[in-house]
Amino acid sequence: MAEDDIYGNKKRYEFVVNSLSSITKKPVSKKYKYYCKNQVNTKYFDKLIINFDVKDLSYIRRVKLLYLLKRITYIIEKDLKKCDRDDINKIVAFFHTTHKTVESKRDFIKDLKCTWRVLFPEKDQEGRVDETITPYPIRHLSRRIDRSKQKRRNDKLTWDEFQCILRFFEKDPQIQAYLALAVESLGRPQEMLFTKIRDYNFYDNYAKIWISEHGKEGTGFLQCIDSYPYVMRWYNLHPFKDDPDA
């Protein structure tokens, strides 16, 4: 069974599932825009949810795919089963207006193709369902995005600015250790916050830190060289450093 994460996506997922009964109703609040415009398409949400349980997907992944389907059923009013390539192109064109970065556009194409394989799988020569075959309406889609449109982010901190932030938290070694390790290792918040004392192996001037659970790409290591002094300082002050499961 999928586990909850630090972002509370299990609760979000349960909320989305419980609200599916009213998914065909136009939202009253201006905060929410999307809803399913055709009652016929509500059955595809149920089919997707069954697939989530079969594959034991993470809750954040489930929420993402349900919101994707919700927007698709807002864009396309006819039965999704009858969608042709023109309809798919209409969906893709719409999402290009909401997904601005190369990475988000690429992920959208991946999620769209994954969803279509689940909802409308092709059959093999024996007439059996085969999810490895890409359905014809989405077969022309490619995750290759024109990188010439990619722009450099202007909100990145300089190294001096980051050092100022570290000095600001001089009296909070826990935050210092987290920030220093995050910048050096590029570890995701959930990967870092689920580490335990037993995952830390300290050496003379570096540490080897295991990602033992909740890793987006499985288990692995976090690099800890420049951040070693900060991590070591917090480890020495940690109230449960003698408990390997802390």
Image: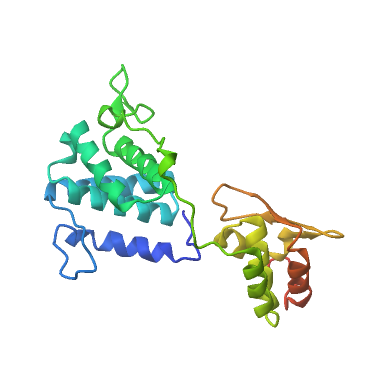
Image quarter for residue 131?
Answer: top left
- 66 or 130, which is in the foreground? 66
Image quarter for residue 240?
Answer: bottom right
> Picture coordinates of residue 135 (x, y %)?
29, 29
Q: Residue furthest bottom?
A: 171
Image quarter for residue 182?
Answer: bottom right
The relative height of residue 214 versus residue 124 in the rendered view (above or below) is below
Q: Is residue 130 left or right of residue 38?
A: right
> Picture coordinates of residue 142 (x, y %)?
37, 33
Q: Residue at x 36, y 53 (%)?
A: 64
> What coloring was used for the rendering?
rainbow
The relative height of residue 18 versus residue 97 in the rendered view (above or below) is below
Q: Residue at x 19, y 57 (%)?
A: 35
Q: Is residue 70 left or right of residue 51?
A: left
Q: Residue furthest top?
A: 125
Work out whether residue 246 can be spotted: no
Work out whether residue 100 can be spotted: yes
Numbered circles on residues, count: 0
Q: Residue at x 65, y 64 (%)?
A: 159
